[in-house]
Amino acid sequence: MIVFILAMLAVLALAVGVVAMVMMGMQGYFRDRHPRLARRLGTLARHLNGEAEIPQALRDLIPRR
């Protein structure tokens, strides 16, 4: 039973994150009130879209062929 509760909390946290990204957007209403969060969410959106550069820390984790 506790597993279901934890899973539901994880789903709710994900939903809140998606709503925050939609509300903030890249040029949303709250951008002027919370510029750091808006910048971070914009960066996250670019990474999810595949438009951003891969971070150096991630490149270091992937072995070269």
Image (cartoon, helix red, strand yellow):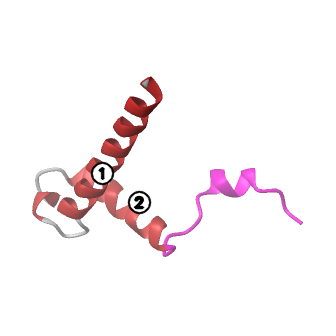
Amino acid bearing label 1: Ala
Residue at 16%, 59% in the rendered image: 31
* Figure quadrant of residue 35: bottom left
Amino acid bearing label 2: Leu
Q: Are marks 2 and 1 in contact (CB under 8 Å)?
A: no
| Image x and y of residue 13, in percent | 33, 42
Residue at 58%, 58% in the rendered image: 55
According to the picture, the residue beneath numbered tag 2 turns out to be 44
Residue at 42%, 69% in the rendered image: 46
Disc 2/disc 1 C-alpha distance (Å):
15 Å
Magenta highlight on residue 53 = yes
| Image x and y of residue 11, in percent | 37, 45
Q: Is residue 4 above or below residue 49?
A: above
According to the picture, the residue beneath numbered tag 1 turns out to be 15
* Figure quadrant of residue 6: top left
Q: Which numbered disc flags the more N-terminal residue, 2 or 1?
A: 1
Q: Residues within 10 Å of mark 2 (few under 14, many from 20)?
A: some
Magenta highlight on residue 26 = no
Magenta span dominant secondary structure? loop
Magenta residues, start to end? 50-65
Residue 40's mark? none
Q: Residues within 10 Å of mark 1 (few under 14, many from 20)?
A: few
Observer-nearest of 32 and 9: 9
- Under circle 2, the secondary element is helix
Residue furthest to the top in view is 2
